[in-house]
Amino acid sequence: MKVRVVRRDRYRLRVTTWGSGVGPHAIVLPGLSADSRALAPQIRMLRSQVATVHVIDLPGMALPPSLLTADASFPQLADQVAHVADELGIRRAVVVGHSLGGGVALHLALRRPELVDGLVLIAPAALGRSLHWIYKLYCLPLIGRALLYPRSSGQRGFVRRFLIGSLRREDHAFVDMLIRHGNKARERALSSRAIVWANQPSLWRRILMLVTPGGEQAAFAVGDRLRELSDVPTLVLWGNEDRVICAGDAVRCRDFHQRAEIHVARGAGHMLPLEAPAWTNRYIARFVASLRPALREAA
């Protein structure tokens, strides 16, 4: 394993790499306020599928300084990932993203299609309209500031109620592990807040959101631009009990990307990669194996 720092403007991005350093490559993008531990089973599996695996932590998520709102839109985050790939000499890669990381992967594929050999999207943002109702509160200046600050109390109820499904909800050791994974660094909290605030809907839509459901992803959803990715091999995985990003968003793949492969796990929530690692890995391994001839040519 090799850990390095890639600089871009005022930011430092941590990159953790396993493997030989040559292609084929996989780029792994964790979700909001998460790191490689949230995708550890998938990283281990990918190491047996491709020559080199890179986990890229977005600015402020692993290293200071914290991300500024002015630099935190989805296209800007995608450009940060593309810059890291360029600095590491990665010409093409399979991109695996969970939650926020999935949304960044989608924007990366739209902005730099030549870089993406395939997309693995696990409960990704940016496909549909809605997020969990609490996102409405995150968008309010004073309330959002308080809610997005790291805290040590009340996490167990949040994890059990919102992050995981019935499959693991009563697994106390599993819940404790997720709580331990929580990072209380101030820079990470500020960076998470910057991402939320930079990708808010317009003011009138935020006002409307307070009294009507949906619309939280309006500012960053890729919409019908998903058609532009119809030639990019895409695997979409979701838990049917996801309370953060509804699994119904996978329908957008069927509407605009009919070649996308979609699978939904029963009893799993937003932490699907850890809740059902064998199920998740089985589909990813099969998907990457189907790409392998093209990956060898690209390497």
Image: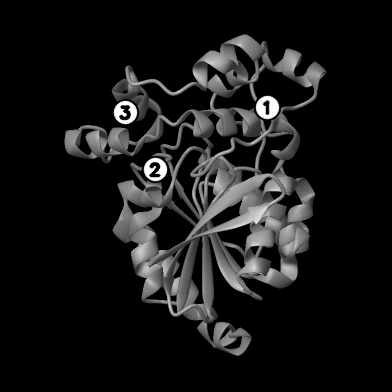
Who is closer to the viewer here, 57 or 6?
Answer: 6
Which x, y percent locates residue 191?
58, 33
- Dot 1, crowdedness within 10 Å: few (<14), some or many (≥20)? many
Which x, y percent locates residue 143?
58, 11
Circle 1 or circle 3, nearest the eye: 1
- The residue that disc 1 covers is 197
For marks 3 and 2, the one nearer the N-term is: 3
Which x, y percent locates residue 123?
51, 46
Which x, y percent locates residue 154?
33, 17
Q: Is residue 287 left or right of residue 104?
A: left
Badge 3 amino acid = Arg
Quarter of the figure that contains the C terminus: bottom right
Badge 2 amino acid = Met
For marks 1 and 2, the one nearer the N-term is: 1
Who is closer to the viewer here, 154 or 270?
Answer: 154
Disc sitting over residue 43 in the figure:
none
Disc sitting over residue 160 in the figure:
3
Cα distance in 3D space between marks 1 and 2: 23 Å
- The residue that disc 2 covers is 271
Circle 1 or circle 2, nearest the eye: 1
- Dot 2, crowdedness within 10 Å: few (<14), some or many (≥20)? many
For marks 1 and 3, the one nearer the N-term is: 3
Cα distance in 3D space between marks 3 and 2: 11 Å
Location of residue 292 with respect to 140 vertically, above or below: below
Location of residue 79 with respect to 161 vertically, above or below: below
- Give the SS element for disc 1: helix
Badge 1 amino acid = Trp
